Image: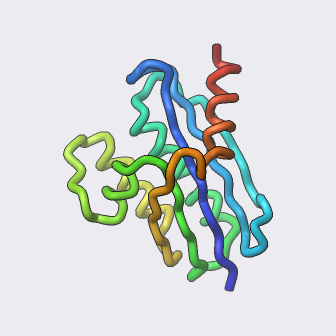
């Protein structure tokens, strides 16, 4: 059974402001099997973080076997703690996004891990490139 690492990051220029996410997925051999960055319009940093997580998990739904292990690494303490069930989700928009992320992660063994920003540099670089292109 394969295991994957999802590294996702989201950000906005202004909060809220023009927002984007970046996501990188690696396989057991630490090879990048997917990367993407999207500008998502006017949103908060937290919405962008969730959108990056969802993009990664939705890609895995299409390409990975059920039961695969997925380690999610984000530098957003808020998203990690909310997805792990340790923090309540008060914002209805974030609750909806968390529900979408749970649905996208269904069928996998998902572990949520907070990492410092410097350990999430690839996803961060992708999102910042997308924001740079958006102007």
Q: Is residue 100 above or below residue 42?
A: below
Tell how many labels.
0
Determine the residue located farthest toward the top in the rendered image. Answer: 135
Q: Is residue 118 above or below residue 57?
A: above
Horizontal side of 63 relative to 95 (left or right) equals right
Q: Is residue 59 above or below residue 19?
A: below
Q: Position of residue 87 (x, y in %)?
A: 24, 57
- Which residue shows up at 68% across the image and 86% down it? 1
Q: Identify the coloring.
A: rainbow
Q: Position of residue 18 (x, y in %)?
A: 51, 21
Question: Residue 24 versus residue 118: which sits nearer the camera?
Answer: 118
State the image quarter where residue 25 is shown. Answer: bottom right
- Which residue shows up at 60% across the image and 29% down it? 39
State the image quarter where residue 40 is shown. Answer: top right
- Which residue shows up at 62% across the image and 24% down it? 131
Q: Position of residue 90 (x, y in %)?
A: 20, 45
Question: Residue 19 versus residue 75: which sits nearer the camera?
Answer: 75
Q: Quadrant of the C terminus?
A: top right
Question: Residue 54 versus residue 81: which sits nearer the camera?
Answer: 81
Question: Residue 82 versus residue 100: which sits nearer the camera?
Answer: 82
Horizontal side of 110 relative to 81 (left or right) equals right
Horizontal side of 106 relative to 96 (left or right) equals right
Q: Position of residue 64 (x, y in %)?
A: 67, 72
- Which residue shows up at 36% across the image and 56% down it? 99
Horizontal side of 62 relative to 43 (left or right) equals right
């Amino acid at each position: 059974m394969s295991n994957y690492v999802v590294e996702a990051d989201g950000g906005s220029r202004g909060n809220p402001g023009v927002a984007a996410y970046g996501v990188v997925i690696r396989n057991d051999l630490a090879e990048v099997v997917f990367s993407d960055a999207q500008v998502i319009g006017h949103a908060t940093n937290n919405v962008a973080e969730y959108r990056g997580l969802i993009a990664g998990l939705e890609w895995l739904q299409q390409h990975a076997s059920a039961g695969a292990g997925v380690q999610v690494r984000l530098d957003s303490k808020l998203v990690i703690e909310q997805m792990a069930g340790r923090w309540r989700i008060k914002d209805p928009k974030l609750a909806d996004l968390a529900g979408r992320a749970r649905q996208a992660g269904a069928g996998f063994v998902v572990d949520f891990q907070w990492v410092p920003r410097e350990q999430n540099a690839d996803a961060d670089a992708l999102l910042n490139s997308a924001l740079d292109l958006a102007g």
